């Protein structure tokens, strides 16, 4: 009889199909009475499948005492209660590396889009304003900019390598300096912001980092500064960011993530100096396929008594 797996929410179609072909999958989001479902399956479920946004809370896991492994479709595990998992010996697998290139690509794209006002230029051309109002106002040059990367992990490092092609001067902020790079290290994100033209948020988020990018950091970035976020929306104080953009206390922002996804504040949507993406940094067919393959591999390996291919706990 197939192993039982609790699937928290829908995931990439081909991956979900393969999951359902090989396991008995219980779909939490479809249950009208979620508590009843969890009670009914509690004795059978050894594995939970989820994504980085939904994760797995301690409250959920307490209702599933036989869960041994959580496999995450994504690299971020901030929504998984890792402390609870470690205390209970629950293994947590994720999908790093396979999405690094796509996320780094989009981060650089957002830098360019913010500096060159690419969405405004698109509208200017598409809506006939070039013909009726003349050329669009000049924008800012990106090549040669001073770029600070907040979080020089796998993705941050991939971003830095791409930015070298634009002759950018790169510095970074981490919990501790890396020994394998020559980029300038800064222990404090506010000081990093003071020294750069563009701040790219690429760190692995944890609850203690909520609101880390606050009014002081944005003030340090200054009226000519740009900010790009491909990490998690919670890292930036969204209200403070909106105020800074509205009052032109920073020049622009490129955002792929938001505090309350999929909801985006109307004020943010209305601003002309922000480029918005619907959390699609890893959203290519090739990468989502690779993420799904790794997720399923993690699950199959654990349930057959092997070590996870990629894991955080």
Image (tube, helix red, strand yellow):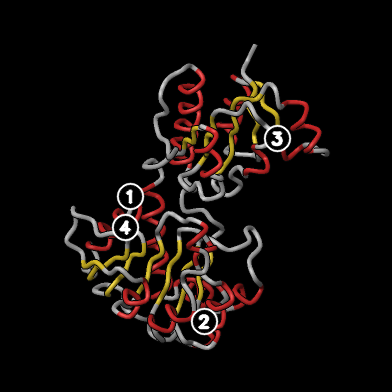
Q: What element carries label 3?
A: loop
Cα–Cα span, label 1 and label 2: 29 Å
At x 62%, y 21%, the residue is 23
Indicate which label's residue lies in the foreground, 3 or 4: 3
Indicate which label's residue lies in the foreground, 2 or 4: 4
Quarter of the image that includes the N terminus = top right
Chain-order first, disc 3 or disc 4: 3
| Side of 257 where 219 appears, left or right | left
Which class describes the residues within 10 Å of circle 4: few (<14), some (14-19), or many (20+)? many
Q: Is mark 1 on a helix, strand or loop?
A: helix
User: Picture coordinates of residue 179 (x, y %)?
Assistant: 19, 54
User: Picture coordinates of residue 95 (x, y %)?
Assistant: 44, 39
Chain-order first, disc 1 or disc 3: 3
**Res 138 → quadrant:** bottom left
Which class describes the residues within 10 Å of circle 1: few (<14), some (14-19), or many (20+)? some
| Residue that numbered label 4 is attached to | 152
| Residue that numbered label 3 is attached to | 63
Chain-order first, disc 2 or disc 4: 4
Which class describes the residues within 10 Å of circle 3: few (<14), some (14-19), or many (20+)? some
| Residue that numbered label 2 is attached to | 245
Cα–Cα span, label 3 and label 2: 44 Å
| Residue that numbered label 1 is attached to | 154
């Amino acid at each position: 009889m197939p192993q039982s797996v609790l699937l928290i929410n829908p995931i990439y179609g081909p991956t979900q199909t393969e999951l359902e072909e090989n396991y008995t999958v219980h779909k939490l989001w479809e249950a009208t009475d979620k508590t009843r479902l969890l009670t009914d399956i509690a004795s059978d479920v050894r594995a939970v499948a989820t994504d980085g946004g939904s994760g797995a809370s301690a409250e959920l896991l307490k209702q599933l005492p036989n869960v041994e492994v959580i496999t995450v479709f994504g690299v971020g595990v901030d929504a998984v209660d890792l402390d609870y998992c470690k205390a209970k010996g629950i293994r947590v697998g994720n999908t790093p590396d396979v999405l690094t290139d796509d996320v780094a690509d989009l981060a650089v794209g957002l830098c360019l889009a913010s500096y060159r006002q690419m969405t405004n230029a698109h509208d200017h051309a598409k809506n006939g304003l070039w013909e009726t109002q003349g050329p669009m106002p000049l924008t800012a040059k990106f090549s040669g900019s001073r770029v600070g990367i907040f979080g020089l992990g796998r993705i941050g490092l991939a971003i830095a390598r791409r930015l070298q092609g634009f002759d950018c001067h790169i510095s970074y902020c981490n919990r501790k300096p890396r020994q394998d790079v020559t980029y300038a290290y800064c222990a404090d994100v506010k000081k990093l912001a003071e020294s750069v033209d563009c701040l790219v948020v690429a760190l692995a988020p944890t609850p203690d980092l909520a609101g880390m990018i606050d009014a002081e950091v944005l003030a340090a970035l200054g009226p000519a500064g740009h900010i790009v976020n491909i990490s998690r929306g919670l890292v930036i104080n969204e209200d403070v960011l909106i105020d800074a953009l509205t009052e032109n206390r920073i020049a622009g922002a490129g955002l792929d993530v938001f505090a309350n996804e999929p909801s985006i504040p109307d004020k943010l949507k209305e601003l002309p100096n922000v480029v918005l993406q619907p959390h699609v940094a890893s959203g290519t067919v090739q990468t989502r396929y690779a993420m799904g393959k790794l997720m399923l591999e993690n699950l199959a390996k654990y349930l057959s008594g092997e070590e996870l291919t990629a894991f955080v706990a």
